[in-house]
Amino acid sequence: MSRENKSKYAIMGLLGVSPMSGYDIKKKIERSTSNFWNESYGQIYPILKKLVAEGLAMRSVESQLGKPDRHIYKLTEKGQQELQQWLVEPVEPPAERIEILLKLFFGQQVSVSDNIRHIEQFREMQQQLLQKYSAIAQELQEKETDNPHIPYWQMTASYKLHTTKALIDWCDETLVKLGKLAAER
């Protein structure tokens, strides 16, 4: 079974929250989903064009004084139905590409100290991400509670907190094993 590009649904989901321009979509992604799903302008604009061509979104133009026109996209009823259909489909297993694991898999080909350095750097990165995700979770906790999207946004922040804590634990466990390897040599 071939993997379908889910970027279309990421953009449709944002348009399901509110109509936006391509620029607005990119900024919303940076402030919300970029911790687990990111899109570039080079992906967003062709997808928007395709959504309009497929009748899943419509585009309107807003004139701006002294600036180029803004193109605002909104899901059509057909687009909302397709988004909702995708949202209830089973989740496919992620196709992961994790560089730290690739390097560790081939770790025998370099020194143990090189592997330790990689894991320590990765652990530090996870510590920084944990602080970032904690701040996001705190911000969401303080946001208006009458926004129906907030509980779902909180769940995604919680996922990132849990996975980051687990990665820190994995780093600690791996550093102990690498320390034992270093001592044996």
Image: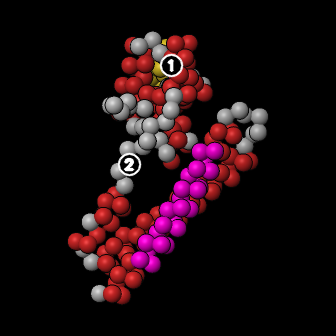
**Amino acid type of the residue that numbered disc 2 sits on in the rendered structure:** Glu
In the image shown, does 90 or 150 lie closer to the viewer? Answer: 90
Q: Quadrant of the C terminus?
A: bottom left
**Residue 162 falls inside the magenta stretch:** yes
Point out residue 176 in the picture as x, y percentages from the top left corner.
45, 78
Q: Quadrant of the N terminus?
A: top left
- Who's the residue at 55% across and 18% down the image? 80
Question: Disc 1 designates what residue?
Answer: 82
Q: Residue furthest left?
A: 109
Question: Disc 2 designates what residue?
Answer: 96
- Who's the residue at 48% across and 72% down the image? 173
Point out residue 81 in the picture as x, y percentages from the top left corner.
55, 17
Magenta stretch: give its range. Answer: 155-177
Between the C-alphas of marks 1 and 2, the distance is: 26 Å
Above or below 88: residue 142: below
Point out residue 15 in the picture as x, y percentages from the top left corner.
54, 25
Horizontal placement of 119 versus 140: left or right?
Answer: left
- Who's the residue at 47% across and 41% down the image? 37
Above or below 31: residue 128: below
Which quarter of the picture shows residue 155?
A: top right
- Who's the residue at 31% across and 75% down the image? 114
